[in-house]
């Protein structure tokens, strides 16, 4: 069922994901990760006091799991946004971004929180960070697509490795170059196919 939940959440089938998460929590009530995900999904949709309370219950159930700290702050930030409490949302989402700086969507929500709290300059900065990350994600996806479409072209691999280097992802660049070295011999690098 956890695979189903992951697939539903990834496909943005949130109603189905919520139902699946509820079933998982019934079966395994100590599953902090599922409780946290359920709490975040509910928080993102909450609009009534009862919905706020339910989301908060699930977020609090996983509060003692250190691996869930960033997600808990994110979920509490979403609740604060839906409660129109910009200052609390800024505090919670800032902490979520500090703990998990790779979570791009946090910066988008943080921009909303700053705007709600009246700090337009900070809102613009957070939104610019989010947009910059989205641009990088699109660039990476395009480079990965080039490899998928042209798996026999070393230039596609080289460009992705250079992208990784430019963005401080040297380990990924190194692994990609290892793949290139195994895949393409010196005659292919000179323009001759080694097939």
Image (cartoon, rainbow, N blue to C red):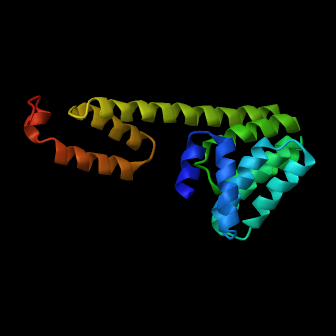
**53 or 76: which is nearer to us?**
53
Which residue lies most toward the right here?
Answer: 49
State how many labels appear.
0
Q: Is residue 82 left or right of residue 5?
A: right
Q: Is residue 22 left or right of residue 91?
A: left
Q: Quadrant of residue 25?
A: bottom right
- Location of the C terminus by quadrant is top left
Q: Position of residue 43 (x, y in %)?
A: 78, 48
Q: Is residue 53 left or right of residue 171?
A: right
**83 or 57: which is nearer to us?**
57
- Location of the N terminus by quadrant is bottom right
Residue 130 sits above or below residue 179 on the image: above
Q: Is residue 4 left or right of residue 186?
A: right
Whether residue 74 is visible: no
**55 or 174: which is nearer to us?**
55
**182 or 171: which is nearer to us?**
182
Q: Position of residue 17 (x, y in %)?
A: 64, 47
Q: Position of residue 11 (x, y in %)?
A: 56, 39
Whether residue 41 is visible: yes
Residue, x 85% and y 36% (percent of image)?
116
Q: Quadrant of residue 165?
A: top left
Q: Position of residue 51 (x, y in %)?
A: 85, 49
Residue, x 78% and y 36% (percent of image)?
112
Residue, x 18% and y 48% (percent of image)?
182
Residue, x 74% and y 37% (percent of image)?
111
Residue 194 sits above or below residue 40 on the image: above
């Amino acid at each position: 069922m956890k695979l189903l939940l992951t697939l539903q959440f990834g496909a943005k089938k949130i109603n189905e994901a919520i139902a699946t998460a509820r079933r998982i929590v019934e079966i395994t009530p100590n599953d902090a990760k599922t409780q946290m995900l359920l709490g975040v999904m509910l928080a993102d949709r909450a609009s009534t006091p009862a919905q706020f309370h339910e989301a908060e219950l699930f977020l609090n159930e996983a509060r003692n799991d250190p691996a869930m700290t960033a997600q808990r702050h994110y979920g509490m930030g979403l609740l604060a946004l839906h409660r129109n409490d910009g200052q609390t949302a800024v505090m919670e989402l800032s902490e979520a971004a500090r703990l998990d700086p790779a979570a791009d969507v946090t910066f988008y929500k943080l921009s909303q929180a700053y705007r709600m709290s009246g700090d337009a300059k900070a809102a613009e900065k957070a939104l610019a960070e989010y947009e910059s990350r989205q641009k990088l994600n699109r660039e990476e996806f395009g480079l990965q697509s080039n490899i998928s479409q042209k798996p026999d072209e070393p230039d596609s691999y080289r460009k992705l490795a250079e992208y990784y280097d430019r963005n401080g992802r040297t380990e990924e660049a190194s692994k990609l170059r290892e793949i290139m070295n195994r895949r393409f011999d010196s005659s292919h690098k000179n323009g001759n196919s080694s097939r």
